[in-house]
Image: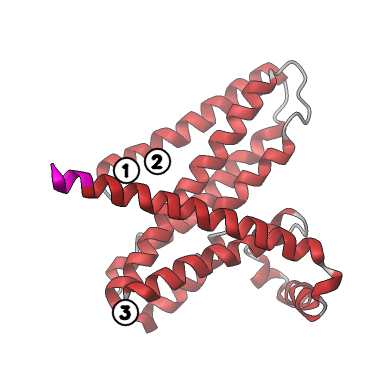
Amino acid sequence: MPLRLLLLNFFSSIWCCVLLAMRIHLAGNTYYSFMVWNLFLAGIPLVLSLALPKIRRLLFAVPLLTTWLLFFPNAPYVLTDLMHLSERAGNVPKWLDLLMLLSFGLVSLGFGFQSLQIVQNWFAQRISRITGWCVALGTLALSGFGIYLGRFLRWNSWDILHRPHTLLSDIAARFADPLDHTRTWGCTLGFGTLLIFTYLFWISSATTVHGSRKLD
């Protein structure tokens, strides 16, 4: 990872923690302290993806990619913490809560997109660009489902090891009778589509800047 990007990730995380500290001081409680844990979970996919370029063969990369995919939805998930806005506000201005939650959400999403771009580039270099895009867009679509599992059913990434049978039966029930779980698929489609558009903006912006530098 380039030093400037490493520093950006570090200082943006510090920014989030500073806002949280201000909020705790004004509110007199630590209600939003769980945001630090959510930020940490959002950073795990990025850390995992940094090891991927060192692996040359897909077979050896499968365990790492599987773990990465399980943790990836934690990054965009933090955006849904906006649902906590104004909970236990006390003496805290609403704009500060909004700023804090947006900061955590967008920084976490940035972690996720950085890791996704690394994974996409790895597949593009090892197999093809089309494969890279299929992996990226498929991951974002699956993340919509992951967000639903985490936000509304309260499942965690490690539950696949801790309570696999219960988790898998919960998932299977929604595939077996999709019409009886409209909220599941509405949330999955909605958040998946939003993430795809946001990532396309992310990639397009980076490509445009890179192209402008070449022209200069």
Query: How many labels, in total?
Result: 3
The tag on residue 9 is 2
Q: Could you tell me if residue 42 is visible in this image?
A: yes
The alpha-carbon separation of the residues under discs 2 and 1 comes to 6 Å
Quarter of the image where the C terminus is located: top left
Q: Position of residue 172 (x, y in %)?
A: 76, 78
Position in image of residue 25 (x %, y %)? 65, 18
- Alpha carbon separation for disc pair 1 and 3: 27 Å
**Considering depth in this image, is 133 or 17 the residue closer to the camera?**
133
* 93 left or right of 12 in image: right
Indicate left or right for 5 with 170 as reference.
left
Which amino acid, mark 3?
Ile
Residue 189, given in percent of the width and then of the height, sits at: 66, 62
Q: CA distance from mark 2 to mark 3?
A: 29 Å
73, above or below 213, in the image: below
Mark linked to residue 5: 1
Stretch of the chain drawn in magenta: 212-216
- Of badges 1 and 3, the one in the foreground is 3
Q: Secondary structure at mark 1?
A: helix
Discs 2, 1 touching: Cβ within 8 Å: yes
| Location of residue 84 with respect to 195 vertically, above or below | above
Residue 93 or 62: which is nearer the viewer?
Answer: 93
Packing grade of label 2 (10 A; few <14, some 14-19, many >=20) is some
Q: Is residue 192 left or right of residue 87?
A: left
Question: N-terminal of the two: label 1 or label 3?
Answer: 1
Question: On the image, numbered disc 3 is attached to which residue?
Answer: 127
Q: Which secondary structure, mark 3?
A: loop
Q: In the image, is residue 214 part of the stretch drawn in magenta?
A: yes
